[in-house]
Image (tube, helix red, strand yellow):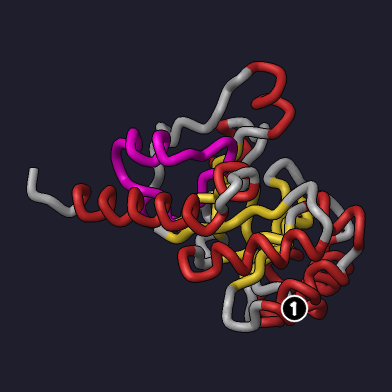
Amino acid sequence: MKIQLALDRLSIDEAIKIAGQAEQYIDIIEVGTSLIKEFGVISISRLKEAFPDKLILADMKTIDNALYEFNLCFEAGADIATVMGVSPLQTIETCLEASAKHQKKTMIDLLNTTAEQKAALFPYTEAIFCDHVSKDVQEKSGLKNTASAAFDPTLEWAIAGGITGESIQNMAGPLPDIVIIGSAITKSTQPEKAAEALREIIERKKAKSNEPA
């Protein structure tokens, strides 16, 4: 499992500082939607300049105008960009085509998608799929991603939405490829130690999942 550090509701300088503290324990740096909306795609460029050896994900949440938005992300330095799964399939396909042209990747955010929509999306096997509990749902209902979804092991999966060390420990079944972690690191008074602890939990979980039944 890779750790994707989600950087949201921060200044660019704060985001760079926290990512630097957690750097050795994370695999992907997510330039959150809030950074892109507040500061523009310069936020993507600044994070890529600060961490050239890390994968940078631009959480663009594209839902239309896909070619323009994905080109913006990739030209700014992103390695992965996100599109909403509720988008028209033409939009999804345009994102995948843009990603292929730039030799980058698309993450499809499954937030609020129906079973029928998911079934239409899963044939896009080149994408990363993100099982996501939204911030508003977390805040209004207290619901967090319990990592209990059944993942198709032939696809690349990420999970997001209030992920903590406890939720990682409680995962059952096939493990996701990526865990997207924000507040558990960014709101910690010691982001480096928080990231280290989460990495240790993940490594123990991976080792346990490989044990014979």
Expressed as whole percent of the image width and height from the top left, the position of residue 45 reads 80, 76
Look at label 1 and name its amino acid. Answer: Gly
Residue closest to the far left = 212
Q: Is residue 210 visible?
A: yes
Specify whether 78 is left or right of 157.
Answer: right
Callout 1 secondary element: loop
> Is residue 155 in the magenta section?
yes
Magenta segment, prevailing SS (helix, strand or loop): loop
Q: Position of residue 161 (x, y in %)?
A: 59, 37
Q: Is residue 64 left or right of residue 195?
A: right
Q: Quadrant of residue 102?
A: bottom right
Name which residue lies at 64% across and 76% down: 104
| Residue 15, quarter of picture | bottom right
Q: Quick one: quadrant of the C terminus?
A: top left
Where are the magenta residues, as a range? 153-177
Q: Residue 172: say if magenta.
A: yes
Instruction: Give the residue at x 72% y 41%.
Output: 86
Badge 1 local density, few (<14 within 10 Å), some, or many (20+)?
many
The picture quadrant where one finds residue 151 is top left
For label 1, the residue is 77
| Residue at x 29% of width, y 39% of height | 173
Residue located at (59% from left, 73% from top): 55
Left or right: residue 82 versus residue 188 is right
Q: Is 75 situated above or below 116?
A: below
Residue 24, given in percent of the width and then of the height, sits at: 48, 70
